């Protein structure tokens, strides 16, 4: 059976918890039905404060309650965006890429990392949870021989975030990833532009930001259409809310999507339980 393509969204709250007028309110023929058929999950883990990427992504990657690992005396704390020593240790021990590799499986992170990324990290190593976990597994960034996907999904990096790729090109890149999944257990895309856009949010958000948000979801929809059209098994996750409410600058308490095609989502109630479901797909339950 073909491997699983994991689209790990950053800062995308579930449409059920989005305010009126959000970027979710548009035609997204591949993405929206998949999200609707999936589950809205709690990302707070019962801990006060706004969920963050360090703990949220660690929950998904390990299937453990990474939020409870943080804070004094087991009180729990949302932490991020980058994993610190505690979360790094958890990722080295229990993250999905590490456990897959240990068991003889194959995984790859398909994000394209530009030369500037490596230059910056040579000066100050500060990887997000996904690149950290793949490196901890002994895997490389920009793996050779596999499709390389710009995590902006064909939008410019800065305002007004114009389209630099056509939707047809994004769809073809989804098809290429689907073909590559035939030779691997797990292919991952760490898709962070949504969180970057979400942090630009404010009560009087300019039209160009709202347009960029809508454009981003259309590009994600095209990628997914390519994946599904080529028969890929797909999982979609998100670490916390943010992007679904461009009227605020911060993360949100929104529930997050857990969706998939060709996979059994089970009955998780939160993102740590969902991470455990994902591990189970690879016999790592
Ligand atoms: Zn953020």
Image (cartoon, rainbow, N blue to C red):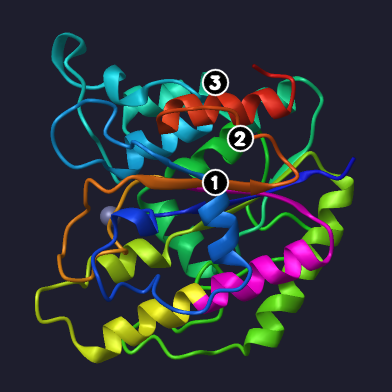
Say which residue label 1 marks: 38
Q: Nearer the viewer, mark 3 or mark 1?
A: 1
Whether residue 126 appears in this view of the structure is no
**On screen, 261 above or below 219?**
above
- In the shown orientation, is residue 28 left or right of residue 271? right
Q: CA distance from mark 1 to mark 2?
A: 8 Å
Circle 3 — which element? helix
Q: What residue lies at 29% left-to-right and 61% top-to-bottom?
A: 18
Magenta residues, as a range?
218-237
Assign ligand 1 to one image quadrant: bottom left
Q: Of marks 3 and 1, which one's residue comes earlier in the chain?
A: 1
Say which residue label 2 marks: 265
Name the residue nearer the viewer: 168 or 177: 168
Q: Quadrant of residue 154?
A: bottom right
Is mark 1 in CB contact (under 8 Å) with mark 2? yes
Q: Which x, y percent locates residue 99? A: 66, 23
Q: CA distance from mark 3 to mark 2?
A: 20 Å
Q: Quadrant of residue 222?
A: bottom right
Q: What residue lies at 22% left-to-right and 45% top-to-bottom?
A: 253
Name the residue nearer the viewer: 200 or 29: 29
Is mark 3 in CB contact (under 8 Å) with mark 1? no
Q: Is residue 41 magenta-colored? A: no
The label number, if any, that marks residue 94 in the structure image? 3
């Amino acid at each position: 059976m073909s491997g699983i393509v994991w689209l790990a969204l950053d800062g995308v709250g579930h449409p059920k918890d989005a305010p009126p007028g959000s970027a979710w309110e548009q035609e997204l023929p591949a993405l929206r039905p998949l999200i609707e058929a999936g589950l809205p999950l709690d990302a707070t883990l019962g801990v006060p404060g706004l969920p963050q990427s360090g703990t949220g992504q660690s929950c998904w990657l390990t299937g453990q309650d990474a939020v409870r690992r943080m804070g004094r005396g087991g009180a729990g704390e949302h932490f991020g965006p980058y994993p610190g020593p505690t979360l790094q240790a958890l990722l080295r021990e229990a993250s999905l890429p590490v456990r897959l590799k240990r068991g003889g499986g194959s995984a790859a992170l398909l994000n394209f990392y530009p030369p500037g990324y490596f230059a910056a990290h040579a000066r100050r190593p500060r990887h997000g949870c996904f690149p950290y976990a793949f490196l901890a597994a002994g895997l490389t960034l920009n793996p050779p021989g596999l499709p390389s996907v710009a995590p902006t999904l064909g939008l410019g990096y800065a305002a007004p975030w114009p389209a630099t790729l056509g939707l047809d090109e994004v769809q073809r890149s989804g098809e290429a990833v689907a073909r590559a999944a035939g030779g691997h257990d797990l292919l991952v895309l760490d898709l962070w532009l949504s969180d970057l856009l979400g942090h630009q949010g404010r009560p009087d958000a300019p039209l160009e930001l709202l347009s960029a948000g809508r454009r981003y979801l259309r590009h994600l929809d095209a990628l997914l259409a390519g994946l599904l059209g080529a028969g890929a098994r797909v999982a979609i996750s998100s670490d916390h809310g943010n992007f679904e409410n461009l009227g605020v600058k911060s993360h949100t308490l929104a529930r997050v999507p857990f969706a998939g095609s060709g996979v059994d989502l089970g009955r998780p109630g939160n993102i740590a339980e969902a991470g455990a479901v994902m591990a189970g797909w690879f016999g790592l339950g």
